[in-house]
Image: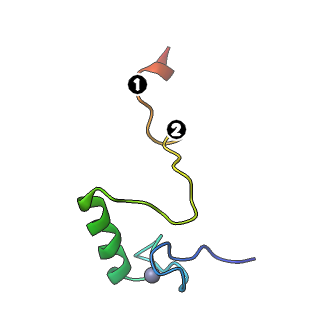
Amino acid sequence: MTKPQCPICERRKCEKPYTPFCSKRCADVDLSRWLKGGYAIPGQPADQAEEAPSFPDADKQ
Ligand SMILES: [Zn+2]
């Protein structure tokens, strides 16, 4: 059983309170990627369907 690795450095395990990152450093790297608009997790396909519905009201009906 392996714990999830930090998606930024891909070397260290996730550590609280910085999960899913290993450290504040990697969390900052991730944040800067967000701000630059080039966010992407290597090895992980774009999957926005689960947490980013286009129409939040759709499932209320
Ligand atoms: Zn890391």
Which residue shows up at 75% across the image and 77% down it? 1
Q: How many marks?
A: 2
- Tag 2: amino acid: Ala
| Element at label 1 | loop
The numbered mark, 2 or 1, whose residue comes first in the sequence reads: 2
- Classify residue 36 as left or right of residue 44: left
- Classify residue 8 as left or right of residue 2: left
Circle 2 crowding by C-alpha within 10 Å: few under 14, some 14–19, many from 20: few
Residue lying at the far top in this picture: please name it.
Answer: 61
- Residue at mark 2: 49
Q: Position of residue 21 (x, y in %)?
A: 45, 75
Q: In this picture, is 59 found above or below 27?
A: above
Task: Tell which quarter ligand 1 is in.
Answer: bottom left
- Residue at mark 1: 55
Circle 1 crowding by C-alpha within 10 Å: few under 14, some 14–19, many from 20: few
Q: Quadrant of residue 52?
A: top left
Q: Position of residue 23 (x, y in %)?
A: 39, 83
Q: Position of residue 29 (x, y in %)?
A: 32, 74
Which residue shows up at 31% across the image and 65% down it? 33
Q: CA distance from mark 2 to mark 1?
A: 11 Å
Closer to us: 29 or 1 = 29
Closer to us: 61 or 42 = 42
Q: In this picture, is 58 found above or below 46?
A: above
Q: Position of residue 2 (x, y in %)?
A: 70, 77
| Element at label 2 | loop
Q: Quadrant of residue 54?
A: top left
- Tag 1: amino acid: Phe
Q: Quadrant of residue 31?
A: bottom left
Which residue shows up at 53% across the image and 46% down it? 47
Closer to us: 35 or 60 = 35
